[in-house]
């Protein structure tokens, strides 16, 4: 079944989504958010709507950067996040 996820102020920028290879987790980014950059959802929970498992703030040298790529490892144990930004 389809579900709608609602977020308050999601900022601007790209939205990214990735499903773990084992089908248990969904990673989602919404450009630049004020509280977190990557949202991780548990797809195995019996309760609906989806359960937010964790949120990950992505720091850079200036404090925060919107992720520009996300990808789970082949065994679904790690989530790789690439963030844009300028390091000077």
Image (cartoon, rainbow, N blue to C red):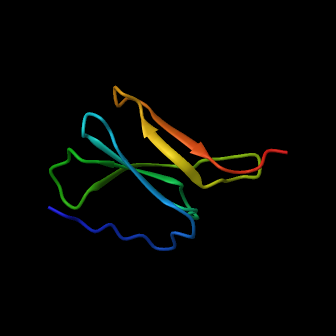
Residue at image location 33% in from the left, 66% down from the top: 5
How many marks the image carries: the answer is 0
Q: Position of residue 10 (x, y in %)?
A: 51, 69
Residue at image location 60% in from the left, 47% down from the top: 58
Instruction: State the residue lying farthest toward the top.
Output: 75
Q: Position of residue 86 (x, y in %)?
A: 77, 49
Q: Position of residue 42 (x, y in %)?
A: 29, 46
78 to the left or right of 83: left
Residue at image location 20% in from the left, 44% down from the top: 44
Residue at image location 53% in from the left, 56% down from the top: 36
> Could you tell me which quadrant the N terminus lies in?
bottom left
Instruction: State the residue lying farthest toward the bottom.
Output: 8
14 to the left or right of 24: right
> Could you tell me which quadrant the C terminus lies in?
top right
Up/down of 65 relative to 20, above or below: below
């Amino acid at each position: 079944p389809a579900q709608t996820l609602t977020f308050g102020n999601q900022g601007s920028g790209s939205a990214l989504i990735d499903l773990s290879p084992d089908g248990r987790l969904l990673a989602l980014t919404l450009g630049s958010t004020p509280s977190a950059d990557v949202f991780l959802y548990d797809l195995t929970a019996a309760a609906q709507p989806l359960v937010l498992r964790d949120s990950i703030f992505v720091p850079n040298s200036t404090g925060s950067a919107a992720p520009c790529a996300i990808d789970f490892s082949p065994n679904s144990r790690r989530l790789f996040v690439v963030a844009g930004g300028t390091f000077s």
